[in-house]
Image: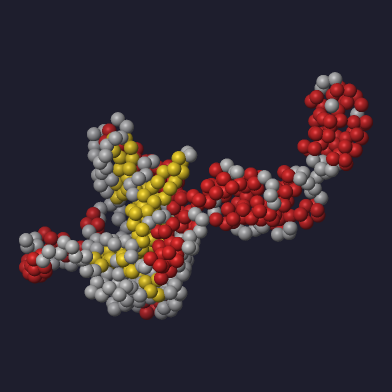
Amino acid sequence: MAITREEVLHVARLARLALSSDEADRMREQLGDILAYIRQLDRLDTSGVVPTSHAVETGTPYRDDSVHPFGEKEEILKNAPDREDDFFRVPRIIED
Amino acid sequence: MGFEAVIGLEVHAQLATESKIFCACSTGFGAPPNENTCPVCTGMPGVLPVLNRKAVEFAIRTAVATSCRVQSRSVFARKNYFYPDLPKAYQISQYELPLAVSGHIDIERNGTTRRIGITRIHLEEDAGKLVHAGAFAGAQTSLADLNRCSVPLMEIVSEPDIRTPEEGGAYLRRLRDILVYLEVCDGNMEEGSFRCDANVSVRPRGQKEFGTKAELKNMNSFRNVEKALEHEIRRQIELIEDGGAVVQETRLWDADAGVTVPMRGKEEAHDYRYFPDPDLLPLHIDEAWVEELRKTIPELPGEKIARLASRYGIPRYDAELLSSSRLLADFFEASAAAFGGNPKVTANECIQWKEAIVAGRLSPETIAHVVEDRETGTISATASKTLVEAAIGTGKPVRQIRDEKGLTQISDAGALEAIADKVIAGNPKEVESYRAGKTGLLSFFVGQIMKETRGKANPRMVQEVLKAKLG
């Protein structure tokens, strides 16, 4: 069961990728190969196996609830392509 | 044909931690734009999130208080979507394996208890805030403030057990009170630290299957949730009765117009492609930690209401009002303990002066002393009110104010009898008419005594004394 062209375009749209027609075809082939490779796992009966979410199971470390300000707001803001005062300026997103 | 509504509520509660859920930035409200940001919460490449222990603790305590089962292993997942308030382009949440499952909250309505199931409780991070400064028609940009990015949220999802808007409101208020009692959330709905979305469908009474549901958003008060549910239920029933069908969609509550309207487009955005976050290892919670936190759970609102009503013999309604705040209920109990008079009077006083009590401007002794002075007849109900107001204003002990202002009333039987004798002796004609049956003249004698005492006589005792003497 290969991946369809529509699925490729759908996933590309979700990832905000603009694919040309040639690229979509190439991606379909490559993704199909990857899926076929992964699908080898289907030969095993995994019905009783808990899905692996992480390669290690040590449990997540914690931090204590204390505030340590980063204190370099300029460093954060200067990465933005556009700003207004101390806001990031972004394309308008209100739908009207 | 009768319809019934099926309602499930999803609450997002902001956890009252000092720092964010995955970084050490402040969660403080009202800071200048982007003041509380760092490379982690703005999604810079190469950074790693580290989980705030307090956020987990708060979620566990909530789970215990709502009879949920805390899962020994839960997993953080990435919910992927693009939006300018989400710099990483994914929200860290929990999906297939939430922190806690299968709990419930009991609500009491009209003397009966209803149990509303809780499907799950999970942890996640908030997104930033978009400001539409100068949002005139045609404005091409919005402004993003990422201070709120990664502030810890707890999502609490109910089972579709709610059948009426009133039940929904009662569930929400009880849940809010529980979170506030636990001190894990400030419960402020208007400021957005307690938000609610609703899933609503209707079905013919007796039908087992659910109807098609609509999701309601944008309800920022308990009253608005109830009104939005009412409107949406009516809309769906009318739609079906007119031969139409409910469409599965997200609708926004328009509080000004009093209607729900469909949210525009973006259906594709619902394909979130969740997957386990590789940056956060599974969350392991051992039973010992849960048991340790179980010991920190205070008496919860439902238990407190029942206990206050039975222990003090006050109406359930009063117990509910007192229990609306842990501080108020504690204050009531301290007042009742300071003076063993009629707790009903103490309860009324506490309810009347709730605002000042919660603001910390009254002491339990103040209420105890005025209640006691009223029961002994030392002060009148009117004086009691004046005294409490003065105590709030000056902070002085209420009995000192009473004596300074001379607000005591004469409740000494001997003294009142002497004055009554004097009044009776001075008004022989009225005495004769009274004894001949014009009992309405009693108020004349009361008035005379009040005049003599400049209003300080205890009116109840004056009546008793007069009736005995005029007999």
- Rendering colour mode: secondary structure
Labels in figure, total = 0
Q: Is residue A20 above or below residue B309?
A: below
* B436 or B300: nearer the viewer: B300
Q: Residue at x 27, y 61 (%)?
A: B96
Residue B208 in the image: state x and y as whole percent: 26, 39
* B305 or B418: nearer the viewer: B305
Q: Residue at x 64, y 44 (%)?
A: B344
- Left or right: B372 as drawn, with respect to B430: left
The quadrant of the rendering that contains the C terminus of chain B is top right
Residue B464 in the image: state x and y as whole percent: 80, 34
Q: Residue at x 72, y 48 (%)?
A: B372
Residue B35 in the image: state x and y as whole percent: 43, 73
* Residue farthest along the top direction in this orientation: B436
Q: Residue at x 28, y 52 (%)?
A: B264
- Left or right: B407 as drawn, with respect to B331: right
Please say whether residue B238 is visible from this viewpoint: no
The quadrant of the rendering that contains the N terminus of chain B is top left
Please say whether residue A29 is visible from this viewpoint: yes
